[in-house]
Image (cartoon, rainbow, N blue to C red):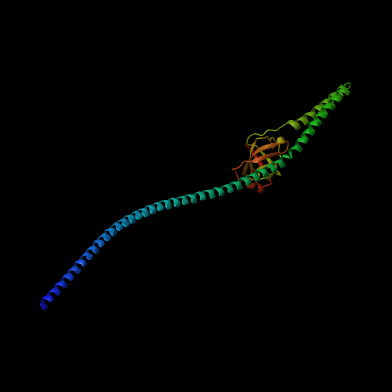
Amino acid sequence: MAAAWKAFSFHSAITGLESALEAKRKDVKELKEQMDEAAKKSKENLQTLTSLRDRKKDDAESAEKDLEGITLQVEGQREALKIKEGKIEQLAMDLQEAKKSIAAVQKEVEHAQNRLTQFSSTLPVMEDKVSGLQAAIEGERQREAEGERTLTTYESITKVYKQHFSLTLMELQNYLYSRPWLERGEKVSVSNVEFDLQAGFLGFPAGRDRGIEKGMTFTVRADGRNICRIKVNQVSTKNSVAMIIPLYGKPLDLRKYKSFDLIYL
């Protein structure tokens, strides 16, 4: 009886343990299913995250490439801007130099005009002398006419008077109108020469009375040396103003001499 009870107790205990084991198996199975479901969802989430990460990485690489392209464009534009700024600065400097050159040329032209005006101011004096001489000739003609009227009865005296008057008038006319000429190669010696090297003008005391005419070209010599060439711009009876021809000789050497020979070319 005691043995049967003990066997029953063992059987009951085994049955209870089997039931508990079965329950644990169910719990393990459910837990495994939950773990599989979680693993599946984790895998899906991982794939999603991986795909998202790859897309973000691609987007980042594309953005980086775009940024590099934009950076290169910006650098190129900066270099082009620097070049343009350099050109603008150079142009500004060239413009300033051009303005300075123009101002210097304007000053030289103004100075030359002033000097030419000063030289030209001496010509009216010469013209006044010529006018006075012409007036004297006209007076002699009038006196000749008066003499002819008053000396009609004195033929011999009138003849002598006319002869004397004609000779006087001839000399006056020769003095006024006679213009000696120069052959090419002939020289005219002058002194008391005035010159303005900056303006490029030279004035000398010789005019139509020495055969000088406007437009003539001369070589200026001193002590057997060719110094420069000049071209006559203005001329009166006894004075002339000439332009120093550039790029020939050494006009600065004019300062070394007092007298010169002008060789007609």
| In this view, 250 is above or below 37 | above
Which residue is nearer to you in this view: 104 or 224? 104
Q: Is residue 146 left or right of residue 232?
A: right
Relative to residue 71, is residue 30 drawn left or right? left
- Residue 67 location, x and y as percent? 41, 53
The quadrant holding residue 12 is: bottom left
Depth check, front residue: 113 or 144: 113
**Camera-side residue of 176 and 44:** 44
Locate residue 191, reporting x and y percent.
70, 43
What's the residue at 39%, 53% (across, down)? 63
- Using the image, determine if residue 88 lies above or below residue 122: below
Asked if residue 197 can be seen in this view, the reply is: no
Q: Is residue 143 left or right of residue 252?
A: right
Please state, as top left, top right, bottom left or bottom right, where the N terminus lies in the image: bottom left
**The quarter of the displayed image where residue 56 is located:** bottom left
Residue 83 x/y as whole percent: 49, 50
Q: Observer-nearest residue: 38 or 11?
A: 11
User: In this view of the protein, can residue 16 be seen by the observer?
Assistant: yes
For residue 64, side relative to residue 102 (left or right)? left
Quadrant into which the C terminus falls: top right
Residue, x 58% and y 46% (percent of image)? 98
Q: Position of residue 178 (x, y in %)?
A: 73, 31
Quadrant in the picture for residue 109:
top right
What residue appears at the point 56 percent right and 48 percent down from the top-left corner?
92
- Number of numbered discs overlaid on the protein picture: 0
